[in-house]
Image: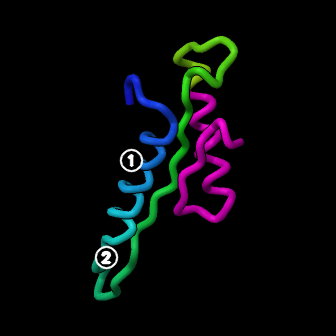
Amino acid sequence: LLDSSEQPAAEAAERLRGCVNAVRVDACGQVIGVSVSGGLCRASHLAECTPQRAYAAADAALYLAKGAGRDRIVVYGDV
């Protein structure tokens, strides 16, 4: 999100996660839930911000979210 602070970006990601979490899918007669894990990074948290570093930081946060049990959002600054 351009020109956004961490809080609004994290709130938007949580709203998206919550909406996806509310979805139920019929898979061959069995209803299953869907979850989302996400990683966020604010460019100002990086010493030298390049697209590659921002992507790597968000990716690291994503894998922390997955490792912490999934279905959650992790912000790079919280890592």
Q: Quadrant of residue 75?
A: top right
Percent across and percent down for residue 16 are 36, 54
Image coordinates of residue 78 in percent, x first then y, are 68, 42
Residue placed at 30% from the left, 75% from the top? 25
Tag 2–tag 1 contact (CB < 8 Å): no
**Residue at 55% across, 28% down:** 42
In this orientation, which residue lies closer to the viewer: 77 or 23?
77
Splitting the image into 4 quarters, where does residue 48 fall? top right
* Residue visible at 33% across and 63% down in the picture: 19
Residue 27: x %, y % from top left: 32, 78
Q: Residue at x 29, y 88 (%)?
A: 29
Task: Answer left or right for 41 relative to 15.
Answer: right
Q: In the displayed structure, does residue 13 sit left or right of residue 23?
A: right
Helix, strand or loop at label 2? It is strand
* Principal secondary structure, stretch drawn in magenta: helix
The residue tagged 2 is 24
Q: Secondary structure at mark 1?
A: helix
Q: Is residue 43 above or below residue 24?
A: above
Q: Amino acid at mark 2?
A: Arg
Percent across and percent down for residue 53 are 61, 21
Name the image quarter holding residue 62: top right
Coloring scheme used: rainbow
Is residue 48 found left or right of 9 in the rendered image?
A: right
Relative to 71, does residue 11 appear above or below in the rendering? above
Q: Is residue 75 magenta?
A: yes
State the CA–CA distance, disc 2 to disc 1. 21 Å
* Residue carrying label 1: 12
Mark 2 Cα shell of 10 Å, populated few (<14), some (14-19), many (≥20): few
First to last magenta residue range: 55-79
What's the residue type where badge 1 is placed? Ala
Which tag, 2 or 1, sits closer to the chain's start? 1
